[in-house]
Image (cartoon, rainbow, N blue to C red):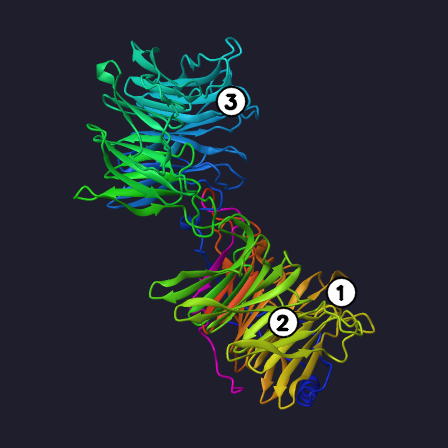
Amino acid sequence: MQHASNYQPPGWLTFLLWVLAFSGGIAATVSDAAPSHPRDIVQTVSNPLTGIGHDGEADDGYGYSIAVAGNTALIGVPWDGMTAAFQGSVHVMTKIGDDWQIQAKLVAPDMPEFGLFGTSVAMSGDLALVGANSAPNDAGVRTGAAYVFQREGEQWHFVQRLIPRNAIANDLFGWKVAINGHTALVSSTKHLDTTSGRIGKVAVFQFDGTTWSESAPWLSDATINVSFGTALALQDDMALVGSPGNERVDVYELSGGVWQKTRTVVAPDNDPLMTADGFGEALAVDGATAVIGAPDTSKIGEATTGRAFQYDISQDWAVVRVLSSSIVDASRFAQGLAINGEQILSLSAGFTPDTGYLHLKAIQTGQSVVELPLSYGVYESMPIAIGTDEVLVGMRQATVGPNGRQGMVARFTEDTANIWSPTDSLNSGNGGYSEGFGLSVAISGDTAVVGMNNGDYGDIAFVATAHVFERGEQGWVYHSRLVPPDPQRGSLISSYVDIDRDTILLSGDNSQTQSDVCHVFVREDSQWVLQQTIPCAGSDPTSRALSGDRLVIGARFRADPSGQEGAVDVYRRVVGVWSLEATLRPDNCPESCGFGSAVDIHGDKILVGAVSQAAQNSTHYGAAYLYELGPQGWGMTARWTLPTVGYFATEVALGEHVAAIASRTPPESGVGAWTGAVHVFGDHAGSWQFESEFMGDTSLAGDDFGSALAVDGNALLVGAYSANNQRGTAYLFERSASGWQQSMQFQPAASLPGTPIVFGYAVAMSGSDVLIGIPDYSEPVPWGNALEGAVQFIDSALEHIYSDGFE
C-alpha cells in the first residue's frame, strides 16, 4: 500500500515550536503549507444497530388489530410512520415451534400521512385483507380503503385496493374487515347513503378469479349513527354485522350467489333488572355457536358490567346462556370475543387503572376455566385472536421499553395439563422517529455509550438519554439505558456522553430550569447508578470530557466580573464526591474569545479550544490552549494558533502524547469555503512539537472534515459527516516511525439508504475498536423509523500501530 509523504514543517519552525512549548511559552503557530493527502484502502461498513428488531416507536399502536390463520398472524400497527406520520403497517408473523418470527411487513402503496393502514385486519388462507380507514381515494379524499395481499411461498404481494362506489369523505371505510374464500367484507360506520338517508354500510366484494368486484352493499336501517359495522364475523356462507348503537346484530346468508339479510338478533329482555347496552360491539362465530358481546350491560345490584350472549345457530338462534365475569373488579365484560372450539374467550377491563382480564368459559357449561390478569389494562375495541394452543391479545396502549403506547401483543398458552399461563409477548422492538441516536458516542474497553437526543421515556417525550452496550461472547449487546433523575419533557436535551472505565457522563441542557447539567453514573457490580449531578452553568452541551477522577466542563458563555467570557471548570472526585478543583481562564484571551468551546482531558493534561477568538489583524479565528497539572496546580504550557484565515480549534482531542486540533477555512479565505484540516502536535520527552497537518485523501470543501475527533495511542479518528456526497466518512490516521499516515477510510455501505445520514457525526476509539455515530440514519422502508439514528461498531480496525519511541 502506497502513501504520500506527510508534510513536515521547516526545521526552524519545528525548533521554535519546541522551544516555546518546552518553556511554557505562548503563540506557537502552525505552518500554513498545504496539507498532505495520503492514500489508503476504503472500507465500507453496514449493519448499524437498527432494523427489524428496532421497528417500534412510541404511539405506534402495535396490536391495534389481530388476525390468525394457522401458523400465521397479522398484527396491525396503524400509527406506524415510515416516510410520513401515521401511515400504518401490518406485521406478518409466522410461528416456528413455540416462537413467532417476523415474515414480512405489509404497507400500502403510496400511503400518505394519517392513512392508518392496519386499522383492521383479516386473513383467509394465503389472503390478507387490511383496512385503512383514513386512506385517500384517487382524488385525495379521505374515504378510507381496504387492501388485498396474497402470499406466494414466503413472499407477500399487493393485489388490489378496494374502495366502494359512492364513497365520500370521512366514511371510515375499512373500520372492520372480514374475508373468507372469495368474499370480502369492509365496513364504513359513518357512511351516509344520500338516497335513503341511512348511516352505516358494509361493502361486499366478490372475487371472480381475476378481480375483486363490489356487489350490492348492506346498509343500516337507521337514519342516525348506530355504528353499523362496528363488528363483523364471516363464516362460510353466513355473516354477522353488529350495530351496538341500536343493540342489534344483522345476519346475512349467501344463497344462489346472492347475499340476503335473513334475520336480526336482539338481546333477550327476560330479565327486567338488566339492560343489554352495547349489544353487537363484539362478535364471534364457530360452527353452530355464535357469541354476541354487550359490554355496557348493567344489572341492578351488581357492580360488574358487561354480558356475552351465547346462541345455538342450529336451533334457530336459541339463547343458550348469558355469560358474565366472576371477578368483582371487572367492567365491560365481552368487549372482545373469540371461540377456540371448546371455550369462549372474553376481555374485560378492571376498575383499577391499567388492569384487565382474559376470561375463558367452557362452551358446554359456561363455567369459568380460568380468568387471567392483563397487566396493561383493557381498552375499547381491543382485539383477541386464537392461535395454535395459544391466545393473542392486542395491547395497543402498552409501553415497550422507553416507548409509551408503542403497543404489544400479549400471549397466553395452554400446557399439557390444560393450565393456561402468560408467555413472552410480541412487540416491534424499540426505535423512534428523529431521536438522534448516535449524536454522541464514547467507548472504553468492552463498554460503549451512545447518546440520544429526542427519545421517549415511558409517556414522557423529548428526554435525552444514554444507551449502554457491552461486548461479550456474542459481540456488542444492549445493556441498559441511563436517564436523568426525575425525567420530564425537555429535562435533558442536546445530550453529550463520555466514558472512562467505570464512569459515564451524561450531560445536556435542562429546558425546564434553563440550566446545564452533568449527570455522572458509576458501575456498581453490573449496574449503572447515578453518583452525582453537577451544574454546568454557561457551558456548551458538547464541551465536556471525562478522564479518571476528573471532569472538565467548557463554559464559553460564562463571564467573569470584568466581562470576559469563557472559562473551563475542572472537577475532581475524591471518595465518590465531585467538587470544583480549579477554574481555568487564559490571561491573553480577549472579550468573547470563546474559550472553552471545545475541551478534552487525558490524565494530567487538558486541551481547550477558543474557536471565536479574534486577533488584531482579524485573520485569526481561534486558538488552542494546553494545560498541565504541576505542583502549583493547573498551568498553561502551550498556546497554538493558525497563521492564515480560518477557524482554529473547532474540535480538539487529547491523548497521552498526541494533541489533535481541527480547523475550518471560512469563505473569505479564498482557498475553498469550509475546508477542514486537522493539526497534530506530539509530546516528545516533555516537549510538545508540531508534527503534521492533514486532510482525508478524498476530502473536499464543505465536507466538514474534522467535525469529530478521537485519539487513542498513536491513532487518530476524524469524522467528516458531509463527505461522500453528503453521506459521511470517517478517516483513520496512524503514527509510525515515518510520521502520520492515513491507514483507513470508513464509509456507509451503498445499501444504507438516505442522504444525508451524517455518518461520522460522532466518533470514538478505544484500543483497536472504533465507534461511529450515524444520527440521521433511516432504516430502509418499510422497516424502522425516519431519522432514528444508528451507530456502527468496528472491531479491530487498528492493525498498523507502530511504536515510535516517544512513549
Q: Residue at point 65% right, 75% down?
A: 569
Task: State the separation of the CA atoms marked 2 and 3.
Answer: 58 Å
Q: Name the residue: 68% across, 83% down.
A: 636
Residue 84, label in figure:
none
First in sequence: mark 2 vs mark 3 = 3
Residue 206 image position (x, y, % from top left):
36, 18
Magenta extent: 783-807
The residue under label 3 is which amino acid type? Asp
Mark 1 or mark 3: which comes first in sequence? 3
Q: In this view of the protein, which residue sits in the foreground, 350 or 458? A: 350
Q: What SS does tag 2 mark?
A: strand
**Is 340 within the magenta?**
no
Residue under circle 3?
A: 171
- Circle 1: residue type: Ser
Residue 178: x, y in percent?
A: 36, 25
> What percent of the width, then of the height, locates residue 294?
37, 25
Mark 1 to mark 2: distance in Å?
31 Å
Q: Residue at x 22, y 30 (%)?
A: 341
**Closest to the observer: 695 or 586?**
586
Per the image, label 1 sits on a secondary structure element best described as: helix
Mark 1 Cα within 10 Å, few/some/many (few <14, many 20+)?
some
Disc 1 target residue: 669
As drawn, 703 above or below 19: above
Q: Which residue is mark 2?
A: 553
